[in-house]
Amino acid sequence: MVYIIVMDNEIKTIVANNLIALRKRKKITQTDVAHALNYSDKSISKWENADSLPDISVLCALSDMYGVTLDDLTHENAVEKLKAQDTMKVNTPNRLIIACLSIAVIFLIASLVFVYVMIKVGAVYWQAFVWGVPISCVALLYLDRKWSGIKVFRPLLLSILCISLLISVYLQFMQYQLWLIFVLILPIEVIIVLSSKLHK
């Protein structure tokens, strides 16, 4: 019985703190909240002082009003989670630009290698551009891991990396007739798909 009372008080405090922080973040008053929900100022004050807890329908209305989930509202640091989401939204265009810049730099290096080999050796080393594909995949995988990106893209990037790597090796050593290395594609794809299912 004591445990239930303690838990009840703890939830009231968490909800109260979240309601205050979310209201202040939205720059509205208790009166504004009261009008929006068709409740009295006293009720809003009680909720924010942890004197009482709104019923489930009101909690749902409050979570909609503040743009959070019901789960966020009843757990600590709802505002911090919102800020993290906002930061993610702001950074998305920058991340796309950084990813594109990384690929551009890789193909710039491939172009320099191509030109250097052409000038120094007199050979047309077009394979430099082919190697740019798996190297770009490695760079994108690194950025994706660093940014904790969408996990759906990782298996796709890994597939492109493995296939492009096999193609690059084959084209680099064409004189050795290494076409049998393409047999590796199937088991590699199976490993990638199964390992991606493990993380879910």
Image (tube, rainbow, N blue to C red):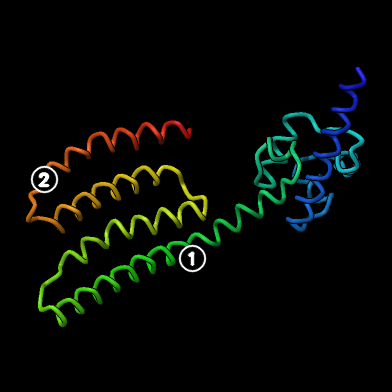
Residue drawn at x 16%, y 59% as measured from the top left: 172
- Which is more toward the observer, 187 or 66? 187
Task: Give the image location of residue 153, x and y in percent.
Answer: 39, 46
In the rendered image, the quadrant that contains the N terminus is top right
**Relative to 140, 11 lies left or right:** right
Q: Quadrant of residue 37?
A: top right
Q: Quickly name the residue at label 2.
A: 179
Give the residue furthest to the bottom: 119
Which is closer to the viewer, label 1 or label 2? 2
Residue drawn at x 28%, y 69% as measured from the top left: 107
Give the residue furthest to the top: 1
- Which is more toward the observer, 182 or 108? 182
Q: Quickly name the residue at label 1.
A: 94
Residue drawn at x 72%, y 30% as measured from the top left: 57
Vertical position of residue 115 compared to residue 61: above or below = below
Amino acid type at image mark 2: Trp
Amino acid type at image mark 1: Asn
Q: Earlier in the sequence, mark 1 or mark 2?
A: 1
- Which is more toward the observer, 82 or 142? 142
Say what secondary structure mark 2 lies in: helix
Residue drawn at x 21%, y 65% as measured from the top left: 129
Tags 1 and 2 in contact by the CB under 8 Å rule? no
Say what secondary structure mark 1 lies in: helix
Gap in Å between the C-alphas at discs 1 and 2? 40 Å
Vertical position of residue 135 compared to residue 30: above or below = below
Task: Give the image location of residue 86, x and y in percent.
Answer: 61, 56
Q: Quadrant of residue 18?
A: top right
Task: Give the image location of residue 147, x and y in percent.
Answer: 52, 55
**Relative to 93, 104 lies left or right:** left
